[in-house]
Amino acid sequence: MQIEELKLLNFRNYERVGVSFDPNLNVIYGKNGSGKTNLVEAIYVLALTRSFKQIHDKTLIRHDTEVTKIEGLVKGKYQNTYQVLITPEGKKVKVDSNKLTKISEYISKIPIVLFNPNDLKMIKDTPSIRRKYLNIAISQLHVSYLKQLNSYNKLLKIRNSYLKQMYVNGNALQDYLDVVTEKLVLEGLQIYEQRKEYIALINEQIASIYEQIVGSGNLCIKYTSDYSKKSKEELVEIYKKSLSRDLSFGKTNLGVHHDDICFCLDGKDLKDYGSEGQQKNAVISWKFSEMAIFREQKGVLPILILDDLLSELDMEKIKNILSFIHEEGQTFITTTEIEKIEYLLDEKSYKKIHIRNGKLEEV
Ligand SMILES: Nc1ncnc2c1ncn2[C@@H]1O[C@H](COP(=O)(O)OP(=O)(O)O)[C@@H](O)[C@H]1O
Ligand SMILES: [Mg+2]
């Protein structure tokens, strides 16, 4: 999958941009604040309709303007034009001239894997952030996963509000709660299975990738879930037992909405024991694992974005990371230090794009 051309209108610090990309490797360089991350963010939004940053969509609209439009000519099996339009009222997506009413039908058409230094959050931050990363990865692989997630979350909301109602109104029907709980368990089990399977696939890749980047260390991902190794019947029973607790909290205390993953290096949690460098290499290894899984399952490589790759890593590791860049996939690297990348990329052919204050120059 390749983005051949990208057009932006009033996206972040870009007023109007049209740029064509190399089918394989693109190196985007420029000073801090020039717009490198903004450009790869636009590519990410084109693929997934939202930013990788935890921001409101309207932040993407250039200051003092009303609408931003991102348009890309994308080559997969066919060549299609994708378009994302964002206004303060909402967003619209289009493939060629067809407006899609469901965003879920649009995403997963352009698979993408992005690394940004902020992704260290995946290790350092709360379980909910880790689940978010995991959800994005799985939903690109299985469209149905997003639907399951949505219906689980809906059932959870219903269950929680009914718990509150039961607490206030002692004679509310227990039967209704049982029905909702059973549905919740069924959806939850499907989500659990998909997550378990995905983590197993990650674990087939991640140790050797980490080792090749860093030179030593045994990295694995541990998945923890309330649903682990439990049947539907056992889970329904567990929910029954925790009813009084759920009632007093007014919410559901057990479920896949509490799942977590842990990055374990040589048996220790990188969150507590890892250096910044180890954490960064672990997250990059996860991203390359995502790439490998996607290719194995779907036969195509996602678009890979490595934003600000050089910061805080030594040359040796960066060299090893660059060796994972596939000839057949499309990659975008952003950096402030073009000389270093040029030296490392050696005889690889690539396109250089220079950014200065929201203006692009193809070099
Ligand atoms: N909605 C927006 N409208 C105009 N400028 C923006 C908007 N959002 C961010 N910017 C500007 O974009 C610049 C940051 O660009 P960024 O891509 O993060 O730089 P870098 O090249 O360091 O990655 C900042 O100068 C910021 O003020
Ligand atoms: Mg940046």
Image: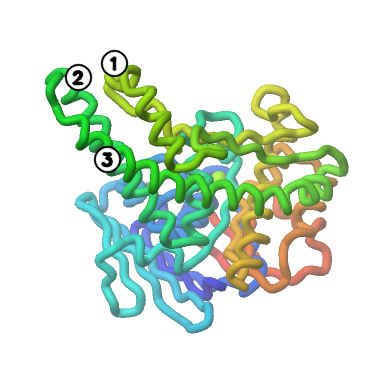
Are the residues tagged 2 and 1 within 8 Å (C-beta)? yes
- In this rendered view, identify the residue nearer to me: 288 or 82: 288
Instruction: Report the amino acid beneath label 3.
Output: Val
Badge 3 marks a residue whose secondary structure is helix
Q: Quadrant of the C terminus?
A: bottom right
Q: Quadrant of ligand 1?
A: top left
Q: Quadrant of the N terminus?
A: bottom right
Q: In this rendering, would 150 be left or right of 304?
A: left
What residue lies at 52% left-to-right and 49% top-to-bottom?
A: 193
Q: Position of residue 325 (x, y in %)?
A: 72, 62
What residue lies at 38% left-to-right and 22% top-to-bottom?
A: 242
Tell me if mark 1 has few (under 14), some (14-19) or many (20+) residues whose alpha carbon lies within 10 angstroms of its own. Answer: few
- Residue 167, label in figure: 2
On the question of residue 321 being in view, the answer is: yes
Q: Which comes sooner in the sequence, label 2 or label 1? A: 2
Tell me if mark 2 has few (under 14), some (14-19) or many (20+) residues whose alpha carbon lies within 10 angstroms of its own. Answer: some
Q: Position of residue 241 (x, y in %)?
A: 38, 23
Q: In this rendering, would 95 be left or right of 111?
A: left
Q: Position of residue 115 (x, y in %)?
A: 60, 49
| Residue farthest to the top, as pictured | 248
- In this rendered view, identify the residue nearer to me: 203 or 300: 203
Q: Label 1, on which residue? A: 248
What residue lies at 64% left-to-right and 60% top-to-bottom?
A: 293
Q: Which comes sooner in the sequence, label 3 or label 1? A: 3
Q: Quadrant of residue 107?
A: bottom left
Q: Label 3, on which residue? A: 180
